[in-house]
Image (cartoon, rainbow, N blue to C red):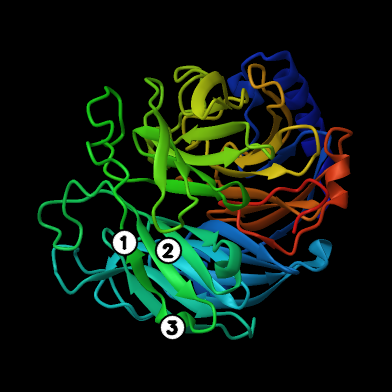
Amino acid sequence: MSTPRRTLVAAAAAFALALTGMPALAADIPPPDTVVTSPNVTHVLNIPKPAPIAATINTDIAFQGGYAYVGNYGGFSIYDIRNPKKATVVSSTVCPGAQMDVSVYGNLLFGAVDSSRNNDSCQSVFQSATVKESWEGVRIFDISDKANPKYIKSVETNCGSHTLTLVPGKGRDKHKNVYVYVSSYLPAENFPDCMPPHDKISIIKVPLDNPTAAAVAATPVVFPDGGNETQPGLLVPTSGCHDITVYAEKNIAAGACMGDGVLFDISDRLNPKVTARTTDPNFAFWHSATFSNDARKVVFTDELGGGGAATCNEATGPNRGADAIYEIVNGQLVFKSYFKISRHQADSENCVAHNGSLIPVEGRDIMVQAWYMGGLSIWDFTDAANPKEIGYFERGPRAAGGGGGIWSAYYYNGYIYGADFHEGLDILKINDPLTDSAKYVRTDRLNVQTQESYRGGWH
């Protein structure tokens, strides 16, 4: 899809402003629904949400082969992206249950359900977690037929599954089992299957030759002595983890755990051990994590306002609702700096650091990241103390009103994919000397929370 000339002019002006480090003025906020990009980013295509799930919002994305799997509060859709310029919808599976964080492995798709339901079926409706018989957890689908995915198994987990992370087995176990780390939180005394203090994760073991035998195999407690519960300004006190990113080949993981950031040793897949832990007075909600390719750094995001507030403005400032960059020194987390987009958003636009992935550039640390109605940002944190934005894409405030924006923004085989709440799937391309070498790196699968090294090409 071509970009209107007036958009390019606005993009060039906004990009120049961003490079100066000056805050954007109200006059620099794009007109409603107008697409704006930096000069090095091209908006290739937008695919509106398919009709079966058009009324519910898009969430996470997973990739495998020439297909993208986009989660949605109402289920998920499969897109054929073998030719990204002509990407098409293959199918939509209606199976409601927030928030449908997705991962794929072979012929299996795993979906997270953090909405208490009256049963585990795709016809289920909301039912309070105070009812013992209510269900929430993980659904497993057979996606061998992309046009007709089949729901094959459910696994109930304590407090549901807000997010999930796929973890391959080790050694001889690698081709036998895959593990799913389930993050969940917000227990309550009147929830029979989600009682305080919780403070744990659930680990599902999935036999690859018999995935319908998947079951919870362990529930390790992350915070046996309690997490960060008293810090002023926390969105909610720690009672588990919001999201976990694993780097399986290095046997490590990073947990964004509400009020805490942690590192794990996952040498024993069923018994992850916390090896480092930190807090930050500027962080309201530790949301997600991304390792550098060499695993010497980790970026944590702060979902200030829970994703529903306008925090990309002068009043909030540059150090809240931002990314925090840490170096890993002798196994411990050493804070280096914050990164936040400098393009101030309107007070009507929910904007905060959200899901992103590395762009595979050898020798540099560059990632693309979603910022809800702040669009997506491409930024370089090679110098951990001095991160810099190098490109962006965004839309002006919604003419229809209300919140929205890009939930997840990931790089896959030469293109950037953004799952927008309302607008559907955006496909973009960056052309920049800093990132051009990434186009030569290819992978057959990308679950962003399951990091793999790309030195010499992904596996």
Question: What amino acid type should be assigned to the residue bearing mark 2?
Answer: Ala
Label 1, on which residue? 160
User: Which residue is located at x 22 percent, y 26 percent?
Assistant: 230
Which residue position holds label 2?
112
Marked residue nearer the N-terminal end (2 or 3): 2
Measured in 3D between alpha carbons, the distance from the residue under mark 1 to the one under mark 2, in whole angstroms, is: 8 Å
Count up the numbered dots.
3
Please state if 257 lies on the left or on the right of 436 as rendered: left
User: Which mark is nearer the camera, 2 or 3?
Assistant: 3
> Looking at the image, do the residues carrying marks 3 and 1 touch, with CB atoms under 8 Å apart?
no
Q: Amino acid at mark 1?
A: Gly
Could one spot residue 5 in this view of the protein?
yes
Category of crowding for the residue at label 2, using alpha-carbon neighbours closer than 10 angstroms: few (below 14), some (14–19), many (at least 20): many
- Residue at x-position 34% and y-position 33%: 259
User: Earlier along the polypeptide chain: callout 1 or callout 2?
Assistant: 2
Residue 452: x and y, percent?
66, 51
